[in-house]
Image (spheres, grey):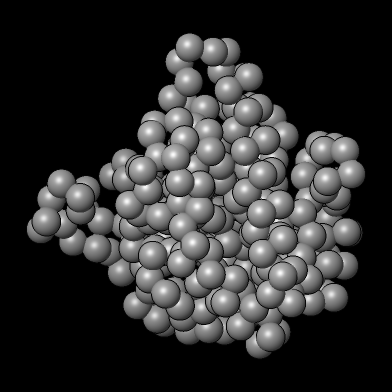
Amino acid sequence: MYKRIVIKLSGEALSGANSNSDSNGNGNLYDTTIIDNIIADIKYLTDKGVQICLAIGGGNIWRGRNADHIDKTKADQMGMLATVINSMYLCERLIAAGQTAQVFTPFSVGTFTTPYSKEAAERTLKDGGVVIFGGGLGHPFFSTDTVPVLRACELNCDCVFFAKNINGVYDKNPITHPDAVRYKSLTYREIIEQNFEVIDIAAMVLCENNNIPSIVFSLTEAGSIRRAALDKDSDVGTIISV
């Protein structure tokens, strides 16, 4: 069982694999079933003593890389704000389920969130609360995949969970290739050399350099978070290591 983890929740996964969202993420913001499963798994794990951080993407609301008609920096800043909205939503859902949680951002959002510091995040975790990272890193040109890895390094986490709408890393696109094969395990170097576009390359290099394992798995499978967290040898998704 992992003791302290960071879970990266992609915005697209929050809206469901069959979301009607367009390329900018407009459409169904949240899949109720998936959100309920996330809340249930997190509550179950915190009751077991697992300390949990969440890093939230914003692709269900806004995808900056598809916004060719506006400045790249502004598009990324809008994406950061989208992650804050998702973070506040998940926080309120957790609180309603009886789980304490707090949203931290690298920039001020009035009184809506708490400015991030390692010390404040540590206190929340040790008190049994869930730490939620919104706002990305606060700077453009960094993907939200980088956030959970950087925070995992700072907070000495055991593993980074990348929860997506696909259940692992495949040798080719499983959507267009029915014969695609899922890898049970890979190294960061293998992913980088074979150019698998599953995690941002900067995040993978940071994981590799700091010897932090990660798991790529699907949110659409009920209980996938708790199974991955409680059993390091589970067959949930793809395990990536140095």
Please determine whether, in this image, residue 95 is positioned above or below residue 87. Answer: below
Residue 34 or 242: which is nearer the viewer? 34
Residue 54: x and y in percent read: 64, 59
Marks counted in the figure total 0
Q: Along the horizontal axis of the image, is 167 left or right of 155?
A: left
Residue 195 or 69: which is nearer the viewer? 69
Q: Residue at x 18, y 61 (%)?
A: 181
Q: Residue at x 72, y 34 (%)?
A: 138
Q: Along the horizontal axis of the image, is 231 left or right of 2?
A: left
Residue 60: x and y in percent read: 49, 43
Q: Work out which quarter of the rendered image holds the N terminus and state it.
A: bottom right
Q: Along the horizontal axis of the image, is 194 left or right of 59?
A: left
Which quarter of the picture shows residue 153? bottom right
Which quarter of the picture shows residue 220? bottom left
Please determine whether, in this image, residue 104 is positioned above or below residue 238. Answer: above
Which quarter of the picture shows residue 78? top right
Q: Residue at x 67, y 35 (%)?
A: 81
Residue 154: x and y in percent read: 74, 56
Whether residue 172 is visible, yes or no, is no
Please determine whether, in this image, residue 1 is positioned above or below residue 106. Answer: below
Whether residue 66 is visible, yes or no, is yes
Residue closest to the far left: 179
Q: Residue at x 53, y 70 (%)?
A: 36
Please determine whether, in this image, residue 74 is positioned above or below residue 27. Answer: above
Residue 142: x and y in percent read: 59, 33
